[in-house]
């Protein structure tokens, strides 16, 4: 079992719609959770972090965390073509010493 | 200048050759990491270092070695390159907290082994 799992996609959404991305993790002691956006050939860019159960909103992005279910999600509201990218879920496990990434979900926003 | 600089940006090398990828940073961070990215596999950790005297293997260290020459420099070597080491390589740094906010990535090195 991979430590951090994501659906690879592509997730195709029309412009203006909500994109919903999911991530599960195996280390029950994990405390810190992140979403990175990565454009093709570029380095990852941090867009959201979440540490407590519940929702966290930042502009058009909402991260949701459910530690009991070992599940973290990202919602992108009013999706724009510029949101077309790969979104990487990343987790710092119980040991707290390194960031582990999922395989990424590719999102395509169609005008 | 970039906070984390990787050289070279692109490299094509032949099977069996030794190659070194270099990373330098001006962030003043103690922790440095080397990740490898293959399509659909996200970023996988190769090696990490929490200070000059500390080197740790990541999940895919076989076939790689590293050197932490100074707080600001962390090099990755492929002693005898093979085609399945063709990938995009990222160096990253973080502060003592090690949290996602503290990670700064370099621009990446695209390595092709033929």
Image (cartoon, coloured by chain):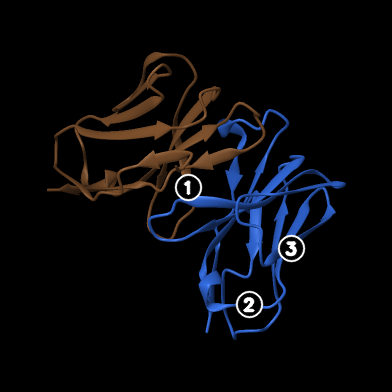
Chain colours: A brown, B blue
- Asked whether disc 3 touches disc 2, contact meaning CB atoms under 8 Å apart, the reply is no
- Check the image and report above or below for B62 versus B70: below
- Check the image and report above or below for A34 versus A111: above
Residue A44 badge: 1
**Mark 3 or mark 2: which comes first in sequence?**
3
User: Residue A109: percent from the left, percent from the top?
Assistant: 19, 46
Q: Nearer the viewer, residue A60 or B83?
A: B83
Q: Secondary structure at mark 3?
A: strand
Subunit bearing disc 2? B
* Residue at (56% x, 33% y) in the render: B100
User: Residue B69: percent from the left, percent from the top?
Assistant: 84, 57
Q: Residues within 10 Å of mark 2 (few under 14, many from 20)?
A: many
Question: Residue A93 is drawn in which quadrant?
Answer: top right
Q: B91 left or right of A73?
A: right
Q: CA distance from mark 2 to mark 1?
A: 26 Å
Q: CA distance from mark 3 to mark 2?
A: 12 Å
Q: A61 left or right of B111?
A: left
Question: Residue B17 is drawn in which quadrant?
Answer: bottom right
Q: Residues within 10 Å of mark 1 (few under 14, many from 20)?
A: many
Q: What is the quadrant of the N terminus of chain B in the image?
A: bottom right
Subunit bearing disc 3? B
* Residue at (67% x, 34% y) in the render: A97
Q: Secondary structure at mark 1?
A: loop
Residue B81 badge: 2
| Camera-side mark, 2 or 1 | 2
| Camera-side mark, 1 or 3 | 3
- Asked whether disc 1 touches disc 3, contact meaning CB atoms under 8 Å apart, the reply is no
Do the residues marked 1 and 3 share a common chain? no
User: Residue A76: percent from the left, percent from the top?
Assistant: 26, 32
Q: Secondary structure at mark 2?
A: loop
Which residue is disc 3 drawn over? B65
* Residue at (53% x, 25% y) in the render: A32
């Amino acid at each position: 079992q991979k430590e951090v799992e994501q659906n690879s996609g592509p997730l195709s959404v029309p412009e203006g719609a909500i994109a919903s991305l999911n991530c599960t993790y195996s280390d029950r002691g994990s405390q810190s959770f992140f979403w990175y956006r990565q454009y093709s050939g570029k380095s990852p860019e941090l867009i959201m972090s979440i540490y407590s159960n519940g929702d966290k909103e930042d502009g058009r992005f909402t991260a949701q965390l459910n530690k009991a279910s070992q599940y973290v999600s990202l919602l992108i509201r009013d999706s724009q073509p510029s949101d077309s990218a790969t979104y990487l879920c990343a987790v710092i496990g119980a040991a707290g010493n390194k960031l582990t990434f999922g395989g990424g979900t590719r999102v395509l926003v169609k005008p | 200048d970039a906070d984390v600089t990787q050289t070279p940006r692109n490299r094509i090398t032949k099977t069996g050759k030794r190659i070194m990828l270099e990373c330098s940073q001006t962030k003043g961070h103690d922790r440095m990491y080397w990740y490898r990215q293959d399509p659909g596999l996200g970023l996988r950790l190769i090696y990490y270092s929490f200070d000059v005297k500390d080197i740790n293997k990541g999940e895919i260290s076989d076939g790689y070695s590293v050197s932490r020459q100074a707080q600001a420099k962390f090099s990755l070597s492929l002693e005898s390159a093979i085609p399945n080491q063709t990938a995009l390589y990222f160096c990253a740094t973080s502060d003592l907290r090690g949290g996602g906010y503290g990670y700064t990535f370099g621009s990446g090195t695209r390595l092709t082994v033929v």
